[in-house]
Amino acid sequence: MTSSPASASSPTDPSAAPAGLAVAAPERRFDWTLALLVVFCLLWSSAFAVSKVAVAEAPPLLLLATRFLAAGVAMLVPCALFGGLVRLPLRDFLALCLAGVLNNALYLGLAYCAVVTISSGFVAVIISANPLITALLAGPVLGERLKPMKVVGLLLGLAGVVIVLRSRLAGGHEDLFGTLLALGGLLALSCGTVLFKRLRTPASLFMASGVQSLAAGLSLMPVALMMEPVHAIEITPTLAACFAYLTLGVSVGGYSLWYAILSRSTATKASALHFLMPPLGLAFGWLLLGEAVPPLDFLGIIPIALGIRLVTR
């Protein structure tokens, strides 16, 4: 009597294995999404400390404008060579350019100027408030609903940032004008995040990132040339290494990862990753620059970590 398909043993059925033979455990797949998130956070948070090293040998705006132009070329040339360029409607092209000005020129232009007078770790802490600003904008602009637990998470994250801000400013560790510049960069990044999330463009992420970098460089270079002397640039191996890392690692790699994450998630959830920047930014500032970390900074990290858990769960 033949057995029915339902009762027949399959080759992968452990009960069908001969006695004495072990059954191989299912192969565990590597979590590429988690790996990319880790790489993004490390690249993004280390950029402030590396920038602090670089601006000691080159004016911040000239350094930044040159970095954007180089990154834009590095992304768009491969697109052109391998058929990755597409013709964009004028509205989409202008929207990408505006997003580039907000996400690159204004955000990092203000942050680079800020890092001249305040610590790199402190800039990372300020920028980490991006999830709260983005969440407030994403509701009316993108229609993203905030559930009560996510609101609690955002408020916890903000509380952690406020603790660090208060500790740094009240203790006289940081410059007020530099702090205001960093806050302006924070607002620009949040607006750029929401604008990019609203875009519906046929351009690939690599092309979109390249257009934004090029637009940022072209808009920032005239301002940099008017405000900063070219002869102040000191070309050294340290500057060359920092420039290569910031251009290829952060602008090409980090920004492409950021836009990939943003395109696959809500603006609120994706931007919650910025709550990871305070501990990482403080760590890189201490490791690369020897920046002091006041005890209250550690206290502020606790609600930040809880906030990330609630927003991204």
Image: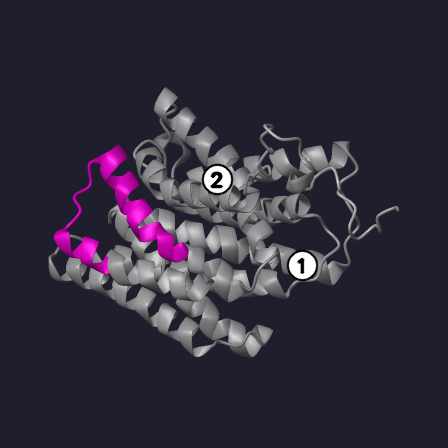
Residue stretch in magenta:
274-300
Q: Determine if residue 162 is in view.
A: yes
Which is more toward the observer, 64 or 234? Answer: 64
Q: Which of the labelled discs sits on residue 94, or is there none?
A: 1
Q: Residue 176 lies in what quarter of the image?
A: bottom left
Q: Which of the labelled discs sits on residue 250, or is there none?
A: 2
Q: Position of residue 171 (x, y in %)?
A: 11, 57
Q: Determine if residue 181 is in view.
A: no
Q: Give left or right: position of 125 versus 144.
A: left
Residue 111 is inside the magenta segment: no
Q: Residue 73 lies in what quarter of the image?
A: top right
Secondary structure under tag 2 reads: helix
Q: Give left or right: position of 279 versus 296.
A: right
Which residue corresponds to the image point at 72% horizontal and 58% vertical from the top-left?
201
User: What residue type is disc 2 on?
Assistant: Val
- Spatial CA distance of label 2 from label 1 is 24 Å
Classify 10 Å Cα crowding around label 1: few (below 14), some (14-19), many (20 and above). some
Q: Give left or right: position of 27 versus 34.
A: right
Q: Position of residue 271 (x, y in %)?
A: 47, 60
In this view, the residue farthest toward the top is 237
Q: Position of residue 118 (x, y in %)?
A: 24, 49
Q: Which of the labelled discs sits on residue 120, or is there none?
A: none
Secondary structure under tag 1 reads: helix
Q: Is residue 299 above or below residue 293?
A: below
Q: Position of residue 56 (x, y in %)?
A: 29, 34
Q: Give left or right: position of 297 versus 198.
A: left
Residue 293 is inside the magenta segment: yes
User: What residue type is disc 1 on?
Assistant: Leu
Q: Is residue 24 above or below residue 305?
A: above
Query: What is the number of callouts on the image?
Result: 2
